[in-house]
Amino acid sequence: VGANVPLLWLRVDPHQEWAMRVRWTGRPDARWSGQPEFMCREQLEHDRDVASQQEAAEALATFPTHSAIDALMWAVYDSSVFFRVRTAAIASLVLLIQPATDYSALTKLMRYFRETYCEGGQVRPNDFSDFSSYHVLKSLIEAIACARDAYGHSPSEAVALLLALLDDNDNSTNEYDDGYYLGAIVRLLASTRTANDGAMDAEGVVMQIRRHLRLDALLQSHGRVLTRCCLQALTQLELAGRRSVNWQFYWRYERDSSEPLLRLTAADCMMRVCLLLHLPFEPLSG
């Protein structure tokens, strides 16, 4: 099939009436839709069916080309596109952050973030009144945080963005709680690892976690979600061997907290550390 064929794109069971799953066998990647790249681009840009656009966005992740990146960025920039399609496009762009494309997908995602969510070099105050924009923002932050170079390291600009989001967070004019938002960023920060990662880098992450633990103790988030995410972030660091296990954090919240979900999270963290690191449990005395 060439670019000169009159067929723009092809879908099997477009109305989703058949109880079956279609899988193309021409390529090993399950996201591939059986079409060449130009047909996936046409499908994403011109089909008005949301499921079809999502399918095209996912399929474009299998084409490490600049044209595929540009098509996905079109969907991200166009606010009239359904937000689930935009988040699918962002998820595909993460997979295209590769040496083959000179990491241009990350550069364009960072540029979009600065143009949309920054002003005067600083992150704008939170505004979660637009449901679609909120989900696109969270997907965008997750995509940038999940970016890795050829050696599996997090780009320095991605880590710097996460730190800026935590340091410059301003929820004073937002009518919605930002606990889930901050908690997600804390967990993403704990999952990053730079090329020169060492004790100082891990300690910087721990300092951010401690700061948000204190913040949530004063201004409690819904269901103590921020504290729960902080405990999970600590567990991520300990499982990665970036800090020694500190049972005190988990045991204190599991024993003394009046929030059931927080106690459950603390117990889950202790269980993960015990089982995955094969360490004996060391509860506090008294």
Image (tube, helix red, strand yellow):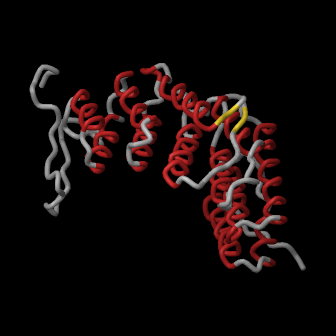
Q: Which residue is drawn at the image coordinates 34% and 41% (left, top)? A: 58
Q: Which quadrant: the C terminus?
A: bottom right
| Residue 52 falls left or right of residue 92 | left
| The one of 80 and 167 positioned closer to us in this rendering | 80
Q: Which quadrant: the N terminus?
A: top left
Q: Is residue 163 above or below residue 66?
A: below
Q: Is residue 148 above or below residue 138?
A: above
Question: Which of the 4 image quarters holds residue 273?
Answer: bottom right
Q: Is residue 270 above or below residue 89?
A: below
Where in the figure is residue 125, as x and y percent of width and height? Answer: 70, 45
| Residue 201 falls left or right of residue 114 | right
Where in the figure is residue 269, as x and y percent of width and height? Answer: 67, 65
Q: Which residue is drawn at the image coordinates 70% and 38% (left, top)? A: 123
Question: Which of the 4 image quarters holds residue 264?
Answer: bottom right
Q: Which residue is drawn at the image coordinates 48% and 28% (left, top)? A: 105
Q: Which residue is drawn at the image coordinates 62% and 29% (left, top)? A: 155
| The one of 149 and 165 positioned closer to us in this rendering | 165
Question: Which of the 4 image quarters holds residue 31?
Answer: top left
Where in the figure is residue 61, as x and y percent of width and height? Answer: 36, 35
